[in-house]
Amino acid sequence: MNPASRYEGVIPPVVTPRTAGGKIDLPSLERLLQHLLNGGVDGLFVLGSSAEVPYMTNDERDMVVKTAAGVNAGQVPLIVGASEQTTNRVIEEGRRVVRDGADALVVTAPFYALTNAQETETHFRTIHSAIDMPVFAYDIPVRTHFKLPTDLLVNLGDDGVIAGVKDSSGDDVAFRQLLMAASGIRDFDIFTGHEIVVDGALLAGAQGVVPGLGNVDPSGYARLFGAAKAGEWRKAADEQTRLADLFNIVSTPKPGRVSAGAAGLGAFKTALMLLGIIDSNVMSVPMLALDDDETDRIKEILVRNGLL
């Protein structure tokens, strides 16, 4: 792990609780944020994929960022997604969330619009020029249908355009190649979004992890990171093995009953509801919540892993 890192450790992508009526549940969100801070996280990432950000109105996004900034009160970096289809829309979104309290931004490649590597480079450089704030490139081709090339990320990092990368590509080979290629860039921090191979990513030189499962068990990821930072790799691997078993909650929904997005995020919300941290596992319309049978299976996994 790079001693020159500005950002490191466990930075969970915060889910967005909703009431039974579908509104943003601010009391539940406040409890969740405090749960994460008490769990020893090193940062908070709001308005990411785990937040169901495509489903949120601008007013809801503002509400979530302001609430997170208020609860956090500067304890850890508040990193906020600026997710829009094209460059000017990202700049508009980015300026708004900075006003609401963001310390850094997370930005994807353009989506819906059909672009290439050259236009994507211009996209990041234009955002950097427009907003005086650290920007992380969010590599998530399942959402953007474009894999950010390693050479593009390294060039942007070398030029100080981006502060690092949040990798949710699922491409472990490309991730390792990025770590190798970027190892000499100062203040360039690379995070894996892959919940179950964090020990390996840290051993390879990643600065941290952005785990959706960290909403449920932030302390477990904090222990994993602490062990890795101390060079206690056997201890880190043992914690990772437990977390890998806990991650089985995402496999509990009945095949085909809910969408892929509702299955994973719904499992996190259902687990948090069972833990008494949020009041409801309601999803954003039109996604369905997990049902009673699926909830019971999640409860079994939480009990098996000592969380209930």
Image (tube, rainbow, N blue to C red):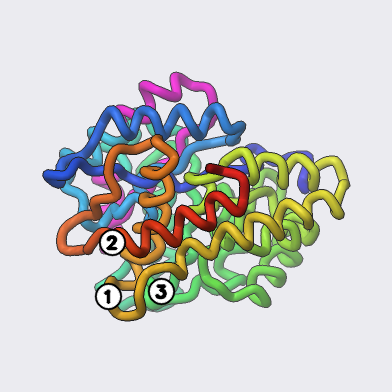
Task: Provide the residue designation for mark 2.
Answer: 291
| Residue under the image location 19 percent in, 41 percent down | 19
Of 162 and 11, the residue lying toward us: 11
Amino acid carrying label 1: it is Arg
Residue type beneath disc 3: Val
Query: Compared to 212, does 16 lie above or below?
Result: above
Residue at mark 3 to residue at mark 1: CA–CA distance? 21 Å
The disc at residue 240 is none
Residue pointed to by mark 1? 257
Query: Mark 3 = which residue?
Result: 142
Would residue 11 be visible to someone looking at this image? no
Residue at 42% across, 76% down: 146
Helix, strand or loop at mark 2: loop
Pick whichever of labels 3 and 1 is earlier in the sequence. 3
Badge 1: residue crowd in 10 Å (few <14, some 14–19, many ≥20): few
Q: Position of residue 253 (x, y in %)?
A: 37, 69
Q: Amino acid at mark 2?
A: Asp
